């Protein structure tokens, strides 16, 4: 293999979204990716890293849809995105398909029988 890290195939392997990978102008996370994957980045530093990026909202949405992503995405840290996801669940309620095991279920009356 003659390709160096940071080439397009390397970026795809790291999970960089197409809109960032194919951006016509230089995107800071492509030019200095190591700064975005430092453990313990504070929220203010995350916002500063992404300030002025034209892909901020799209990048944040991309990361919110993928809980396993670590590092700074869309000006947020991994912990902030976790809190945002939890807040969204509280605001919207549990998914229509049901709730996960271990969560208290609401009693529902079906005909003459009570069900959990």
Image (cartoon, helix red, strand yellow):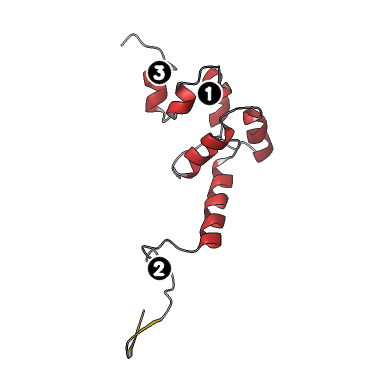
| Neighbours of disc 2 within 10 Å: few (<14), some (14-19), many (20+) | few
| Marks 3, 1: nearer the viewer | 3
- Is residue 34 found left or right of 9 in the rendered image? right
- Look at the numbered disc 2 and give the secondary structure of its residue: loop
Quarter of the picture containing the N terminus is: top left
For marks 3 and 2 on the same chain, the one whose residue lies earlier in the sequence: 3
Q: Are marks 3 and 2 in contact (CB under 8 Å)?
A: no
**Disc 3 packing (10 Å; few <14; some 14–19; many ≥20):** few
Using the image, determine if residue 22 lies above or below residue 84. Answer: above
Mark positioned earlier in the residue sequence (1 or 2):
1
Which residue carries the number 1 mark? 33
Report the number of discs: 3
- Please state the horizontal and vertical placement of residue 109, each as a whole percent of the image: 38, 84
Q: Nearer the viewer, mark 3 or mark 2?
A: 3
Q: Which residue is drawn at 51% across and 58% down?
A: 89
Q: Give the labeled residue for mark 2.
A: 102
Identified at 39% across, 25% down, the residue is: 12
Q: Picture coordinates of residue 14 (x, y %)?
A: 41, 28
Instruction: Name which of mark 3 and mark 1 comes first in the sequence.
Output: 3
Distance (Cα) linking label 3 and label 1: 13 Å
Q: What element carries label 3?
A: helix
The residue that disc 3 covers is 8
Q: How far apart are marks 3 and 2 (CA)?
A: 43 Å
């Amino acid at each position: 293999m003659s390709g160096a890290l940071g080439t397009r195939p390397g970026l795809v392997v790291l999970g960089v979204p197409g809109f960032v990978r194919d951006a016509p102008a230089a995107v800071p996370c492509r030019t200095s990716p190591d700064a975005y994957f430092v453990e313990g980045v504070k929220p203010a530093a995350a916002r500063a890293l992404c300030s002025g990026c034209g892909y901020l909202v799209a990048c944040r949405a991309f990361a919110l849809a993928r809980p396993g992503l670590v590092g700074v995405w869309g000006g947020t840290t991994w912990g902030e995105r976790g809190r945002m996801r939890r807040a969204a669940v509280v605001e919207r309620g549990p998914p229509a398909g049901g709730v996960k095991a271990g969560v208290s279920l609401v009693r529902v009356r079906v005909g003459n029988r009570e069900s959990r």
